[in-house]
């Protein structure tokens, strides 16, 4: 239809010519070619060709990154030391990790990067609060990392109150901030180093729990001085301006808003550090083809100004930088917060969902015992499986919709083993694993010699997997994979309910086992793309 006008022919007539040429050497997997409507061309594949493709499917390995594959950096999570690792960081982590895996699966080399905030007023408020507090309340070095992190979070709240409610205490926080930055006071520096160490140790535990391992961590303290140096350099070139002793970028000249890059006290803001960060990324990895930054959408306006400034400072870097933003994680009752009204800690949410999962598993176990079925979970198994299922419930809820909007989190729906949930996908994969184990026990003949006359939606979905991943990667859209997996699981469970898969007397049994294996492999790979593990049993 696109070419018909240029060729001065009707779309349908052109379609007929194309089909006539195609049919001269049609591949053997095409059953028929038909013209529909004004000039659409429909190709129908042979059922046996689809069935054979499914049998071969599980042999296809995930592509390894090519030696010369373009490097892509994905920066995500970016927590603040001395503050709570909250549900917003959990959202950024789920999205950033899934994007990293999609890009990796597509054959690129991925550099996972984290940019923790380890200097600035947020840190100074915590350190100042501890300096003014009773040191006896401070956890011992031997205390659990989570206890230390909770203490730092409480001190940050105290420090914020100090900063907001008293001019004298506000001045004390500002002076503490200067001392941290200049490392001019031993007591302050030692306390800062302890707080920083405690936060980072705790972050590593959360990353391990979420299945993330960063290749590089760049701290704000690493890029503060270099960022200010670049800003001052381009102050002399007219990109930045002086205003009341501060250095600013006049965004109004570009249809944006003005932002401060260096304060009147001569200290760097987030903006100047971000300039240093972006330059640092390409110093560490000069051959980066793309740098993706995942943040909350409350930073959208900030990034518009920042990227405009970067285009004037380093257009080569700005042109390769893409900002992706996400919304808030909200409960069905509104903003997700703790009992104290503060934003909810990520581990608090994970543990709450984990407790619900454990209760559900125990209830399921009791029902199985009452019906004389075997479903036993040891204490270790229960903890491990409940943790995997809880994280799946949260990650799937975050990733099932487009990245930009707020996510409404319904705890009860998130752990459902039926329907649109992460645990439902895990359960489907475990069910397939169980069937395959049964086929081994029964010494099921593995060679497929008989194929079905007709294939169903399950086979057609399985062979679409590479196209689904390519689309999700191209569109930066994990939700494409999430939606596909729900359809795939539904198709498998219908197939499971309507067929005896392992049956030595059934000629189609080897094919059905192969189909089950292909489903298991695709589902496992698809869940991996979402950052979700398949439990050993459920």
Image (tube, rainbow, N blue to C red):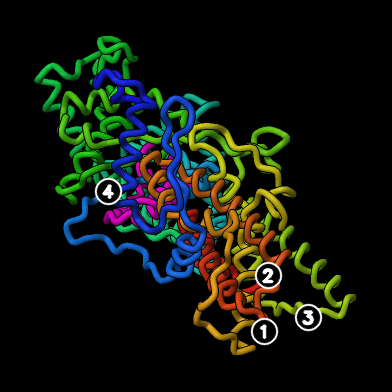
Kind of element beneath mark 1: loop
Q: Nearer the viewer, residue 242 or 107?
A: 107
Q: Foreground residue, 86 or 366? A: 366
Quadrant containing the N terminus in the rendered view: top left
Q: Which residue is drawn at 31% across and 37% down?
A: 18
Neighbours of disc 3 within 10 Å: few (<14), some (14-19), many (20+):
few
Q: Which of marks 2 and 1 is in front?
A: 1
Name above or below for residue 323 compared with residue 461: above
Q: Are marks 4 and 1 in contact (CB under 8 Å)?
A: no
Q: Earlier in the sequence, mark 3 or mark 2?
A: 3
Which contiguous range is marked in magenta? 95-123
First along the sequence among labels 4 and 1: 4
Structural crowding at the residue carrying mark 2, measured as other residues with C-alpha within 10 Å and reported as few (<14), some (14–19) or many (≥20): many
Spatial distance from mark 4 to mark 1, Cα to Cα? 52 Å
Q: Sequence order check: which comes first, mark 2 or mark 1? A: 1
On the image, numbered disc 4 is attached to which residue? 72
Tell me, yes or no, if residue 81 can be seen here.
no
Q: Earlier in the sequence, mark 3 or mark 4?
A: 4
The residue tagged 2 is 538
**In front: 65, or 306?**
65
The C terminus appears in which quarter of the rendering?
bottom right
Residue 54: where, in percent of width, then height? 48, 65
Q: Distance between the residues labelled 2 and 4?
A: 36 Å
User: Relative to 331, does residue 384 appear above or below in the rendering?
Assistant: below
Mark 3 to mark 2 CA distance (whole Å): 12 Å
Q: Name the residue under label 1.
A: 505
Quarter location, residue 360? bottom right
Q: Name the residue under label 3.
A: 374
Give the numbered dot on residue 11. Answer: none
Mark 4 against mark 1, which lies toward the viewer?
A: 1
- Residue 53 versus residue 130: which sits nearer the camera? 53
């Amino acid at each position: 239809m696109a070419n018909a006008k240029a060729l001065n022919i009707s779309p349908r007539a052109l379609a007929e010519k194309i089909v006539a040429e195609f049919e001269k050497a049609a591949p053997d997997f095409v059953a028929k070619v038909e013209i529909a409507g004004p000039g659409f061309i429909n190709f129908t594949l042979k059922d046996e060709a689809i069935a054979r493709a499914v049998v071969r499917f599980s042999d296809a390995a995930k592509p390894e990154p090519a030696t010369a594959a373009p490097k892509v950096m994905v920066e995500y999570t970016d927590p603040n030391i001395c503050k709570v690792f909250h549900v917003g960081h959990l959202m950024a982590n789920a999205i950033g990790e899934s994007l990293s895996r999609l890009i990796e699966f597509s054959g690129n080399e991925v550099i996972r990067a984290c940019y923790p905030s380890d200097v600035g007023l947020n840190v100074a408020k915590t350190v100042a609060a501890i300096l003014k507090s009773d040191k006896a309340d401070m956890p011992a070095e031997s205390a659990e990392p989570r206890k230390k992190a909770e203490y730092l979070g409480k001190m940050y709240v105290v420090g914020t109150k100090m900063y907001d409610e008293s001019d004298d205490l506000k001045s004390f926080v500002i002076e503490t901030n200067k001392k941290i930055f200049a490392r001019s006071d031993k007591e302050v520096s030692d306390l800062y180093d302890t707080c920083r160490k405690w936060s980072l140790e705790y972050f590593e535990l959360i990353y391990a729990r979420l299945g993330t391992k960063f290749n590089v961590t760049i701290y704000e303290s690493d890029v503060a001085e270099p960022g200010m140096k670049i800003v001052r350099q381009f102050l002399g070139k007219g990109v930045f301006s002086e205003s009341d002793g501060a250095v600013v970028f006049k965004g109004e000249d570009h249809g944006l808003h003005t932002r401060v890059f260096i304060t009147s006290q001569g200290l760097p803001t987030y903006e100047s550090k971000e300039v240093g960060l972006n330059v640092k990324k390409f110093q560490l990895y000069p051959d980066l083809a793309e740098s993706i930054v995942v943040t909350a959408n409350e930073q959208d306006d900030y990034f518009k100004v920042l990227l405009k400034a970067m285009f004037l400072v380093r257009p080569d870097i700005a042109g390769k930088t893409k900002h992706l933003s996400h919304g808030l994680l909200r409960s069905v009752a509104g903003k997700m917060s703790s009992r104290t009204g503060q934003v909810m800690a990520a581990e608090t949410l994970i543990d709450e969902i984990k407790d619900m999962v454990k209760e559900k598993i125990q209830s399921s176990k009791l029902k199985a015992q009452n019906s004389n079925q075997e479903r036993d979970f040891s204490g270790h198994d229960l903890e491990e499986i409940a943790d995997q299922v809880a994280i799946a419930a949260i990650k799937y809820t975050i990733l099932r919709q487009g990245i930009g909007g707020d996510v409404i989190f319904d705890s009860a729906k998130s752990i459902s083993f039926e329907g649109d949930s992460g645990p439902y996908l895990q359960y489907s994969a475990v069910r397939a694993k169980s069937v395959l184990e049964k086929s081994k026990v029964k010494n099921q003949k593995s060679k497929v010699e008989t194929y079905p006359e007709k294939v169903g939606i399950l086979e057609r979905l399985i062979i679409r997997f590479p196209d689904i991943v390519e689309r999700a990667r191209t569109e930066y859209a994990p939700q494409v994979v999430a939606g596909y997996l729900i359809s795939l699981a539904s198709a498998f469970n219908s197939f499971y309910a309507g067929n005896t898969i392992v049956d030595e007397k059934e000629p189609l049994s080897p094919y059905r086992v192969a189909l089950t294996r292909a489903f298991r492999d695709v589902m496992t790979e698809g869940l991996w793309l979402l950052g979700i593990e398949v439990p050993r049993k459920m």
